[in-house]
Image (spheres, helix red, strand yellow):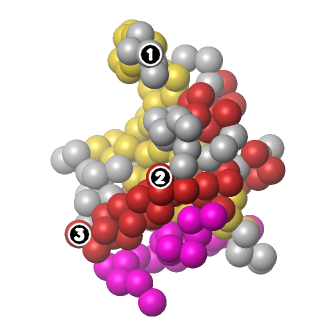
Amino acid sequence: MNDTGGAPRLTDGVVLLRPWIPEDAPAVFAACQDPEIGRWTNVPQPYLREHAEGFIAHSIEAWRNGSAATFAITDAESGRILGSITREPMNGHIAEFGYWLAPDARGRGAATRALRLIADWTLAATDAIRLESYTDDGNDRSGAVLLRAGFEREGVRRAWDLDRAGNPIDSIFYVRLRA
């Protein structure tokens, strides 16, 4: 059993968010072979088995030291890994989220459900006022997830990020505020 610093398990009956465990490395490795994950996230390319093991070790350590909250998104019934969702280290009153889904988990609402769960938990468990996430310009599927999860499109930040070649790319920001 891993010490995950009291990490919760969050579920809506369809998806279950739970801390990562070392045994999840093969599923992370397999999912991150997908070119779409590499296209829209900062996961290393090519993605090697040691990257998956390092990701999980980092996630476990983040729970231990309280710096971030990284969950495996799983099917609540079967336990199958669907993806990953993270609340990055809190920045004062701001909580930022990132996520990816395995190819066979897309199009069924898993990311939207996971984002709602982690956002609601963050509002209940922290003093966060502003919840935010951003997508690369053109990542319309991820933007749709954010909108369905109750975030609003805030605007475009020009040259906010860099692509893998170091070229500037625009990012679209989405926000959900504490009511």
Looking at the image, which residue is at 40% across and 11% down? 168
Between 166 and 135, which is closer to the camera in this rendering?
Answer: 166
**Height in image: 19 above or below 97?**
below
- Which of pointers 3 and 2 lies earlier in the amino acid sequence? 2
Camera-near label (3 vs 2) is: 2
**Height in image: 174 above or below 161?**
below
Q: Amino acid at mark 1?
A: Ala
Residue 109, percent from left and from top: 74, 50
Residue 82, percent from left and from top: 69, 59
Looking at the image, which residue is at 49% across and 40% down? 43
Q: Which mark is residue 17?
A: none
Magenta stretch: residue 13 in it?
yes
Between 163 and 88, which is closer to the camera in this rendering?
Answer: 163
Most extreme residue toward the left is 92
Looking at the image, which residue is at 73% across and 69% down? 80
Q: Residues within 10 Å of mark 1 (few under 14, many from 20)?
A: few
Residue 73, percent from left and from top: 61, 62
Camera-near label (3 vs 1) is: 1
Between 115 and 83, which is closer to the camera in this rendering?
Answer: 83
> Which residue in the protein does label 3 denote?
65
Q: Which mark is residue 51?
A: 2
> Which residue in the protein does label 1 denote?
165
Query: Dividing the picture into quarters, in which one does residue 157 lie?
Result: top left
* Disc 3 to disc 2, C-alpha distance: 21 Å
Looking at the image, which residue is at 80% across and 44% down? 107
